[in-house]
Amino acid sequence: MNTIAPSKNSPMIALTGVHKSYGNYEVLKGIDAEVARGEVVVICGPSGSGKSTLIRTVNRLEEIGSGSISCDGNNIHQPMPAKELNRLRSRIGFVFQSFNLFPHLSAIDNIAMSPMRVKGLQRDVAYAKATKLLERVGLADKANAFPAQLSGGQQQRVAIARALAMEPPVMLFDEPTSALDPEMVGEVLSVMKGLAADGMTMMCVTHEMGFARDVADRVWFIDQGQIVESARPEDFFSRPQTQRAQRFLSELRH
Amino acid sequence: MISDIIAIIRDYWLLLLIGQYPNGPLGGLAATLLLSILAIAFAFPVSIALALARLSNSPFLNWPVTALVYFTRGVPLLMLILWGYFLVPLVTGANVPSFLTMLVTLVVYQGAFLSEVVRGGIVALGHGQMEASRALGHSYLGAMRYVILPQALYNVIPSIISVFVATIKDTTLGYVINVPDLTFAASQINNQLLTQPFQVFFILAAVYYVICWSLSRVAIVTERRITRKRAGTASQATAKSLKLAALTDQPS
Ligand SMILES: Nc1ncnc2c1ncn2[C@@H]1O[C@H](COP(=O)(O)OP(=O)(O)OP(=O)(O)O)[C@@H](O)[C@H]1O
Ligand SMILES: [Mg+2]
């Protein structure tokens, strides 16, 4: 409906002058940035700087005060019927820090449910696809396990598969490994690396600097509601331009 | 004493079972069960609708329903029954059977009570589940139906059963507007015998106890079955089954 046929060169995500306040407190103070198709952007910054708020505005889990956000050629924050917004959301994968799997459904039901209920996929098609996705995240043997029977790392991998089941052209991650025990961080990151290698456009809030170094095309450093630095990871880590970024990195290393 | 009770049952079992039927309206235990089942069957969906209305952002849905819930919870059921009894014929001009008046009153009253239980279950889930559903593209109502309600209702099964049991017990109040139920039949018998009120009402109490007890058994078994299906959450569920013991608890 609102789709301007997205050309290959147009950015996947474009944020223009995005402002957002909670009451008098301005969380996002004018964000201008783009994520190209197939690009992996890692967002980092101190606690409370607005990283979660920013990433949640992209699929409109948060409203914005002013500015605009486009994703895959769609203007996300313009007035539109609820149906249209649901359709747009279904095309933006989102992975939460706290997994938010549906605890009353088995792993495979978690993955197959939304394609059936939202997109009207046939049951057998949805389950065939869910089985493939479980294989892709290395959990083929856990299809019938319930979330409570899975480790944190396994739950997060199911959550990624659940998001992928909607076949979104872009995936957003909000600290996907922060709630995990250290020994489980690797398994989730390697699934994400696989995604990046397959050409998925990704926007990822994380403090896993190893991941940023290996996988990201670009790092956005956010402080106090602004993107203070946007740089290639090798530049950002070796030559941060601002004092704030230098301080952040030195604190992260300790 | 026991022989009296047996004699009463022997002489009046048909009256206790179906009232004056087929020479009069269906009554006795049959009417009590029918009234209870219908009241619960209607109050349950009504309560979900009321809960969703109270949770909605629209003042047109939110306000009247909040007022209704506060009103019904603050007024004795007996008063609602009497009001219904005298008001409904005035408003409709028709002679509504007392059974129907009682049914509607119970549905409104228990529906309002139950809606608070359901709402509590939904609120207790927190935002995460709704957010995850919306992020996948589910509509608000779709998320409610497939994600929120299945969990919220399961979590409040003990309270739901309390309301169901209360509903069954409350059908006895239909007596004051001559609903021909089991209580009505028992008091008819008592009026005929005159000398054995304890025995007659003992039978009445025993029957209600068995009905309510069976319902709570069904609930416990159902809950265990769901819990087993969602294995891994077992420890949580045993705590809930224990709460089922407190059947007299009315949610307030
Ligand atoms: N619903 C809300 N109401 C009011 N203030 C909020 C709300 N959500 C977030 N904030 C505030 O907005 C600021 C940015 O929050 P946000 O969650 O985006 O930070 P963050 O960068 O993700 O931090 P963290 O690293 O701790 O996750 C914080 O100061 C927070 O207290
Ligand atoms: Mg955050």
Image (tube, coloured by chain):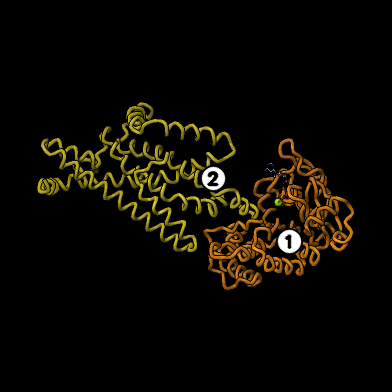
Q: Label 2 vs label 1: CA separation?
A: 33 Å
Crowd tier of the residue under label 1, counting other residues whose Cα lies within 10 Å: few below 14, some 14–19, many 20 or above: some
Q: Which residue is mark 2?
A: B123
Secondary structure found at label 2: helix
Residue visible at 68% across and 58% down in the picture: A178
Relative side of A198 to A131, left or right: right
Crowd tier of the residue under label 2, counting other residues whose Cα lies within 10 Å: few below 14, some 14–19, many 20 or above: few
Provide the letter of the chain coloured orange: A
2 or 1: mark nearer the eye:
2
User: Is residue A76 in sight in this rendering?
Assistant: no
Q: Quadrant of residue A161?
A: bottom right
Secondary structure found at label 1: loop
Give the vertical position of B8 relative to A13 (above or below).
Answer: above
Residue visible at 46% across and 53% down in the picture: B154
Q: Quadrant of residue B81?
A: top left
Disc 2 CB within 8 Å of nearest ligand 1 atom: no
